[in-house]
Image (cartoon, rainbow, N blue to C red):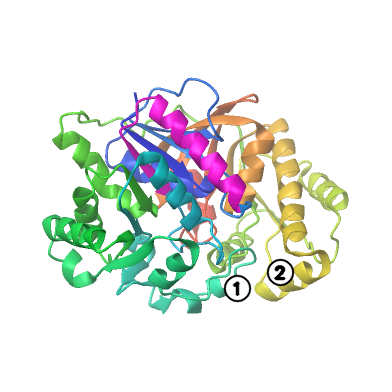
Amino acid sequence: MPLLGCIADDFTGATDLASTLVRQGMRTVQVIGVPDGPLPEADAVVVALKSRTAPVGDAVAWSLAACDALLAAGATQIFHKYCSTFDSTPQGNIGPVTEALMKRLDAGLALACPAFPTNGRTVFQGHLFVGQALLNESGMENHPLTPMRDANLVRVLAAQTEGGVGLVPFAVVDQGAAAIRRAFSGLRDAGRRHAIVDAVTDAHLMAIGEAAALHPLITGGSGVAMGLPENFRRAGLLPAREDAASLPPHTGHAAVLAGSCSRATLAQIGLARDHMPTLELDVLANPDAEALTAEALAWMGGKLGAEPILIAASAPPDKVAALQAKLGREAAGALVEAVLARVAEALVAGGVRRLLVAGGETSGAVVQRLGVATLRIGAEIDPGVPWCFAEGRGPALHLALKSGNFGARDFFLKAFEHV
């Protein structure tokens, strides 16, 4: 039975969280979509939903269904995972999903901590930083689906919730788990239902995890999960494991698909184009899914071999804005997802068995198109991005799902050295 049950609001975020748990010694499996049957054997199960930008009602319903499946399988604690840049709109979905889960689990207080210092995400005095920049000055203010224009997480979460939102500040977190527990109790006694928690180091995340050992619900980025496996070990429920990240050996061709328009992914494409065959689809010039797919399939013919290839539909903010103005925001995103999902299917049919996908929404579309049912989580390429072994209705393959903002500039080049 799983000890920890996790619900992630996108597919790359799910693998990010699963990778964190594997690194801390938990055998972890990622399930695609709400489970409708027995869950795989693992210490932790992460249910990957495509709910980050879904209508609020759908996001809540899917998350509750996932929660019920995890509880039925025996999970003793639920983790609601969202992006380390708190990606959401003024209406949700972080707040509404959290409050629905709180009601289902009878939780009096839910902590919220998206910090991931290893990847430059820190929370100080309730404000989220990306590197040295405030969230709203980091480039996330230009995100095509969830533009983040306020770094004050207390204010952002308060706009999405009915329960009061408080802060556990740096000065308290820095004192350790006991002080954090007291702060949680104080906020609960004051009528607060949510607690934004500061964290600027991994030590802070470990302390927060320890302080929340008895919480039925934890919410945040993958970083705050660092401290949870040790809670289960202290309780005698989790044995020491040295093989949590083991995967079968790889076979077949290799390819990269990029749909993210983040600064990090654009830089990764820029470096990779000098080192591997690269096709950059101009979606603005030719916003036709059939034509773009045909262009990609014609280009990749004969290029699959020992070296990876890259097919990208990413674009800088001005082109993204122009495409959205032309088609509408949702239609523009759906176009890119549809094209790359079809290309992924063709790549796998052509013998690709190592596939790296950049972008949360793109990853969701690709995984669904390929019929992937489960992902067993392996070792990291870069923080937050592991290789996984995917099984479903098609051939088994090694798959890496990268959040748009994650990975070093040479990520696409070194990824295939790690599988």
Disc 2: CA contacts within 10 A as few (<14), some (14-19) or many (>=20)? many
Badge 1 is on which residue? 142
Q: Nearer the viewer, residue 234 or 306?
A: 234
* SS type, badge 1: helix
> In the rendered structure, which disc, 1 or 2, sits on the residue that comes first in sequence?
1
Residue at left 53%, top 76%?
149
Find residue 197 and report its image quarter. bottom left
Badge 2 is on which residue? 320
Q: Nearer the viewer, residue 158 or 120?
A: 158
Q: Position of residue 251 (x, y in %)?
A: 56, 30
In the image: residue 182, left or right of residue 53: left
- Residue 337 in sight here: yes
Amino acid type, label 2: Val
Q: Nearer the viewer, residue 29 or 193?
A: 193
In the image: residue 344, left or right of residue 129: right
- Residue 385 in sight here: no
Q: How many marks?
A: 2
Task: Give yes or no for residue 367 being in the magenta stretch.
Answer: no
Residue at left 56%, top 67%?
267
In the image: residue 115, left or right of residue 287: left
